[in-house]
Amino acid sequence: MNSFEQLGVQRPEFLKALESLGFTTATPIQEKVIPVLLENKTDVIALAQTGTGKTLAFGLPLLHTIDPTKNQIQGIVLAPTRELCVQIKDDLIRYAQNLPALKILPVYGGASIEKQISELRRGVHLVVATPGRLLDLLRRNSCDLSNIKIFVLDEADEMLNMGFQEDIEAIFNTTPKEKNVWLFSATMPTEVRNLSKRYMSDYMELAVSKKQSTAENISHVAYVVHARDKYLALKRILDMSPEIFGIIFCRTKIETQEIAEQLVKEGYDADSLHGDLSQVQRDKVMARFRNRSLQVLVCTDIAARGIDVDDVTHVIHYGLPDELESYTHRSGRTARAGKSGVSIALLHSKEIFKLRQLEKSLSITFARNRVPQGYEVCEKQLFHFVEKMKNVEVNTEEIERYLKDIFVDLESLTREDIITRFVSLEFDRFLTYYRNAPDLNPDIQNETSRKHRQGVESGVTQTMTIDIGAEHGITKKQLIFIIKDLIPRFAVIGDITVRKSSSVAEIQCSRPIFLSREKIYFENKSIPVSLSEATQSTQSEDGYRGGGGRSGGSRGGYVSRTKFTGRSSSSRDSGGYGARISSGDYSNSSSRRSSSDSKSYGSSSTDRKPRRK
């Protein structure tokens, strides 16, 4: 790799800052981007995964363009979240530490807008902002972007995925035509490509990895369990990794909060990060995570944007995201700066198709692991404890005055007695908790065969008609996902015929059924669905098992509306579970999940894990 001086960074104030920060060689994205941005006044699209040094890649060239003697805003950086906004600001200040006259201001929601207006009036050279707050300031005529030379969009794909397109376009319309746009993104979905065509001209596209790919040094692992056992499996995964420093991704704010609270109650060093927290609360949580007071951070996709914490060992997907880009962003929280990491997908049997989708689209392979048994967890924890005991630093000076009396007190015990009792004293908690713990690994093949036989050996057949066909771009695979959401879980999908303007499917079941609703949404259009009267069925050999909508997961870009009934168990390693899933559309692009989604997690009185030290 090249040094920054070889890449064209000549100003001594920046070279000294980089040296003091320990940056001696450039990352691949920095090698490609920095020379282009320093030497050419051009628009640029740069594609690279998170954790590859994109902030420095655009930060150094951006700072080179700023003239501190001019008291006006000369550059703007847009970021999707408050956390990322603050982080970019902090990084830029570190790079410009030898230019005290250069003023950088972060503007984002959750902070005092009056204070931000006051800072803008005093004069700043560079603004790092979230789209919503910047647009608010522009509407109040409190921020003047008429003199900017550089417009940077960081995490552009995530900003558009979060619904900021209109805000971004409104901001673009307040900037001068004579400027350069630098767009940085981990992926290049259609929405980002369309935005670049509208607001960028003669741009260069630079990339250091394949589109829709994840970092090569991430190991991808999947665990398949029953939906009711997901939380229990999560605890076992955490316990099998005593040194874990990780992030758990959930789909909703309520789920995030409740899982974090349950983990804390059971002795884990955990906390939550989601959109309902105030800025002060978010800052406190992130400070605890950065200084490793927390072992695991439970968060939503949106809240996690901007988490740039070194040495994250694991990313756990408590629910797989609907979008491929979201999986890429999530996984990118680990294996940063060339280090290795693990990305774990925790899913139930009806979500396996999403796993295959990810493998095919991202060119990755998930190792299918079995959830560890209780005795395996105990063994792992025991030897971890022994290793810690072997490597502990003994403060002889502080404890020496107590040792004589301790030796006298223990002289009746043999060496083996002392070791055995000491280990038992510390470790009995895990042994007690995992005693008689059940196997959480479902026998998926046998269950699928049994349910399939129950659905088709006797009963009736009904014909479903959906008013979308080949001319709408619908595929048989998409139809399967849609139909599963409309029929009860005991029904089986038979033959499917895709016609020009409509599609027909045979539904086999033990008794007549009704549709969960009589219309769907496909590409934002309302599509009627009908079901014929029942006729006596014949046995099918290759029907698709229905009931996907009851699984609690999404199906090919849509989510369903259904409700779980909580279940409980007297087992020491079991807990109750319930969920409510909101409706969405069957768009080929992205699904929108309601913020009212909720899940509740509870345990019987016997399911209380001893507090971990």
Image (cartoon, rainbow, N blue to C red):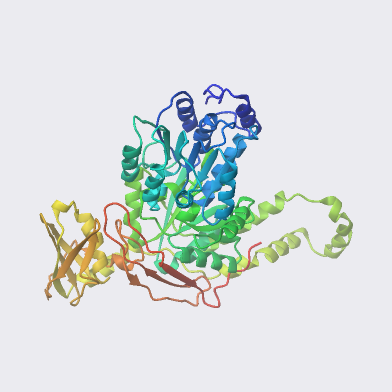
Q: Please, is residue 361 above or below residue 574 in the view?
A: above
Q: Quadrant of residue 452?
A: bottom left
Q: Nearer the viewer, residue 471 or 352?
A: 471
Look at 38% across and 47% down and name the residue there: 170
Please state if 420 lies on the left or on the right of 430 as rendered. right
Front residue (pair 505, 288): 288
Residue 474 % position (x, y): 19, 54
Is residue 216 among what the camera can see?
A: no
Task: Please tell me which residue lies in front, 150 or 236.
Answer: 150
Rendered view: 287 above or below 482: above
Decide if residue 243 is on the left or right side of residue 461: right
Q: Nearer the viewer, residue 516 or 114?
A: 114
In the displayed structure, would residue 199 be above or below residue 357?
A: above
Question: In percent of the image, x 51 and y 70: which residue is there?
Answer: 573
Q: Is residue 131 left or right of residue 117?
A: left
Q: Measuring 42% from the left and 76% from the top, which residue is drawn there?
A: 566
Residue 286 picture location, percent across and down = 59, 54
- Splitting the image into 4 quarters, where does residue 66 fall? top right
Q: Position of residue 321 (x, y in %)?
A: 39, 55
Measured from the top left, where is residue 525 in percent x and y? 22, 59
Position above or below: 532 against 136: below
Quadrant (top left, top right, bottom left, bottom right) of the C terminus: bottom right
Regarding residue 274, the answer to whether it shows in the image is: yes
